Image (spheres, coloured by chain):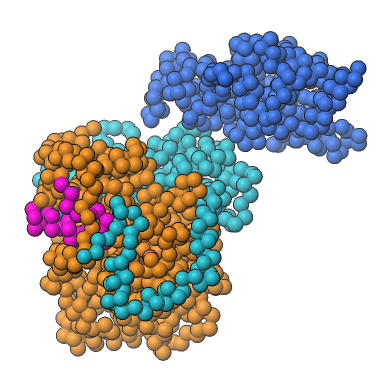
Chain colours: A blue, B orange, C cyan
Amino acid sequence: MNKLEKLTYFPGCTLKDTASDFEISGMAVMEALGYVLEELERWNCCGTVFSLTDDDLMHQIGPVRDLIRAQEAGSEEIITLCSMCYATLKRSSLFVNGNQERLDKINAFMNKEIDYEGKVSVHHLLEVLRDRIGWEKVEERVTNPLEGLSVAPFYGCTLLRPQEIAIDDPDAPTVLQDLTQALWATPIDYAYSVECCGAYQVVDHRDVVIERTHRIMSAARRAGADVIVTSCPLCHFNLSDTQKELVRTIPDYEEMPIIYFTQLMALGFGVEAGKIPASLKAKVKRLQTVKGEG
Amino acid sequence: MSKKGLIGGYPAYMRESIEKVEATRSRRLKEGPPPPMSPKEREAILERNHPDYKPEGKRKLALGPSAGEPVPHEVADIIESHSVIDPRAVDLSKVDYDVDVLVIGGGGAGTVAAIFAHEQGIPVDRILIVTKLRHGDCNSIMAQGGIQAADRPQDSPAIHYLDVMGGGHYANKPELVRALVNDAPGIIRWHEDIGVMYDKVDGEYVEAHGGGTSRMRMHSAKDYTGKETFNSIRDQARNLDIPVLEFFPAVELLLDKRGHAAGAVVYNIETEEYRIIRAKATVLATGGFGRIHIQGFPTTNHYGATADGLVMAYRAGANIIDMDSVQYHPTGVAYPAAILGQLATEKLRTQGAMPVNVDGEAFVFPLEPRDVESSAIIEECWVKNNGIETPSGLRGVWLDTPMIDQVHGKGTLKKALAAMWTMWHRHDIDITVDPALVYPTLHYQNGGVEIDANGYTKVPGLFAGGECEGGVHGKNRLMGNSQLDYNVFGRRAGISAGKWAKSAKVDELSLQHVIDYEKELERAGIDTDRKAPIILPDYRPQAVREHTLGHLL
Amino acid sequence: MISEKQEKEMIRIHVMGKTYEVPAGLTIMDAMEYAGYRFTRGAGCRSGFCGACSTVYRYEGDYRLQFALACQETAADGMYLVQLPFTPAPRAKYDIEKINLKENVLLQYYPEIARCVSCNTCTKACPQDIEVMDYIQAALRGDIAKTAELSFDCIQCGLCSMRCPADIKHYHMAQMARRIYGRYMSPVPQHLENRLQEIADGAFDAELDKLVNMSREELEEAYAARVSEEASAGSERSE
């Protein structure tokens, strides 16, 4: 077996807890592509939300410390799966990298760590797939083509906004559609793929999130989607959690599976890694049988 | 960061000797340690060097239930002394706390006793722990090396029994030793239930020898065994909501008119008030006596180890046993002076560190029972003059700690003996690189208040467990049996107290025994200003003490 | 401590605002006693295990606060010292028998750990050199084993919790993590269960009855006849 190429990997808290299927499938599909996601030996919570106050260096201590961990590991980059971690770490890196005054202040505070040199860049796994591996390579690994499966990409906010950290065109991204096509599935076009799921409104204004979920899911269904694909654990949580509410309150509401993009890849690669909703597996099998018979 | 004139934490002149230790290390590793002594050789070296065997260190008790027993002068001094209270001035008519089970002492034995009294069905609000410092400022928390339990197929409680009896010079009370060894595996099981993280490899316990054991049965949690076990036990007591009064030492036991134990007079260290606790059963768990510094030795013990329970129980009529025997841990810190007398765990030797002299030569089997090992080190330093002198005029021998990583692989010491590594590292000494200078230190009260196998003392309603009781270890305790003792006899005392409290009734409270003791002092012709229990030692310099105005506020 | 011949070099320390001359080479605790203090609080095991003597100090001319155990750290010239009383910190009550490992149980009992901003102030305050913030982060993501492992050396002095800007009670949470690990994630070896069954069945009773009734001479003989398990450690040589 060929030696796997290493990527310095930052998992984030959610992938170690409620979104473990994201990590498990991510590890497995990357291994199939010849890469190993090597977790930082030490890391802390990215902070989840980037602090918008310009002079608030205290809130950069957490994310910058993770950049230091990468530097300690001899790496000049961090790869994330979670799009929230991506956004926070990326924005932090842009905030301090190359800004000597900010670096000095933060380094002075961190007196138990090595100085951060400002050289670590942050990338999302989708960027690695698109820019380094390429969709052709991804397609080559497909052993279980998802032909006929209609996939609604759901980008949410943090991969695309603000503009300076966007991994794709913030208004008309294609990276999830391109991935979908590489797996032989069909991306569908619907109005809500770059909308916000309602995010932390779920805590105080759950009704806002329920209403949004309803709109997002309905639009995707009207466009013919079989499954929603996302890269954000919070979107995943909000959509799946409030969808249960819709199932309860709306007669004849049919639940739609919501998965991470790595799980879609695992399906296409025929890799058993983590749980995939049984209804989705059944659907794929049915489509393939129909195809075979036709 | 090297301090003035020190190289790797040691003065230059010690370096010459360290070089000799380094030069002989590979030969010693190959040849192994000197052979163990025969029983006759052991007796002889004890006779020649052990502080217990010096007749001038002891006198016979002049009064009380065990009058005529020889004990160290320091023990006789606190026993032959006045009460700290005026028994006639204490108002016994107002009871501040009325409980079923009073536990005196917030260390290992006390906490275990409280938990098991509760398990007997005593509600937690009918139990009270009182302690002079905080709950957990105790010797139990400091134990490093481990706890013995014969749980492997090649071992048995019977083999454990023989090891204990031989180590104790056959002076132990057989039924107590039987209880100790037979309960041991169950204690480990209880610890597992409450979540103690014992060292395991591939799902099996890591079990080692200790001095004087013939089977490997030392269970450990790195070298934080006492901290890990005691903290789990205390956490369990806290989850149960067992009440604890901290900074509230007991200063005298209460009896009732019939002479049954009935609680205690306790003292609020801050407000200086006393409180009356009435209890149907009282458990003595007051620990040992290190802080009275027998024969001037420094000690490994905690700040409150002043044998208060021994004094109070003796006045109340309990017997004491084996108090002539003191455990000096062979390896206390001899240098640097800042941590003089603190413990260098026996686990260092079980893991392969050899005691060696100024010339780098091994002179004793590293795992003799503690009294024998201590005697050999004392002899090497002061009779054979092969010790290393410290800047303050003490002597010690090297414990060749770098051998540990050579035997077990690099990194072993820092992982398995983290507390030890840290202790010296704080003083710039790296014991994976350099040996440590050690000398015997006052460690354990082998004897104490006499109990039976269920923790009963001679006084009805008074129970005892842990270091304050005697008879379990005879004239010398083996490593890993003190942790076991506080669990086994703390538990047994707690169970007995719980059972007793269910049917006991307390008659009118009395301090007559204290008044009577005063008369006995007079009859014995003891004219002294001494007062006991002493509660806490006073380490202020003489000049300061002679210059105070006392409590003016 | 027991008096011994002290070296002549003296240093100046400042204890809660008062200046004293004390011999060099003493621990902070011994130095304070030399200065005339008699502890009723703030002294416990005096060996670095109980966490009673957490001390905060600063050097003359330095803005940084430093942290130590008074019984372990050597007093140095120019130290401004204050001893901290043990600070009350609420601990969660739980039943070790009823822990649901499926949920992030540490976060459930100690929700304030989610307030961690990774400032690392706790780690800087730890006199045991524990990576405190790292174990809080491990707890946050539900990694009980890592929390237990990283916090193992904790002596519960409470300095971390006193310094934490998020008011996290690190040491109580870590104690719970270690107990959960010990109880649920580190199985009991089978040989212990076997031994307990043997004891319950009275398998050793006869032998112990015999030993308990032996004369000293018989015991000495039996003791001398023991064969140690491993020649290299703990074996006995009979005459």
Where the N terminus of chain C falls, by quadrant?
bottom left
Magenta-colored stretch includes residue B533: no
Residue A22 position, x and y percent, is 66, 29
Front position in the image: B463 or B276: B463
Does residue A188 appear left or right of residue B399 in this picture? right
Q: Residue at x 56, y 17 (%)?
A: A2
Does residue B380 appear left or right of residue B553 in this picture? left
Does residue B120 appear left or right of residue A150 in this picture? left
Tell me, yes or no, if residue B250 can be seen here. no
Q: Residue at x 34, y 68 (%)?
A: B162
Say above or below: B335 vs A78: below
Front position in the image: B51 or B359: B359
Q: Residue at x 20, y 41 (%)?
A: B27
Residue B189 position, x and y percent, is 50, 60
Where the C terminus of chain C falls, by quadrant?
bottom left
Residue A244 position, x and y percent, is 80, 37
Q: Give the magenta part as a residue range.
A: B361-385
State which quadrant residue C222 falls in.
bottom left
Q: Residue at x 37, y 79 (%)?
A: C213
Tell me, yes or no, if residue A42 can be seen here. yes
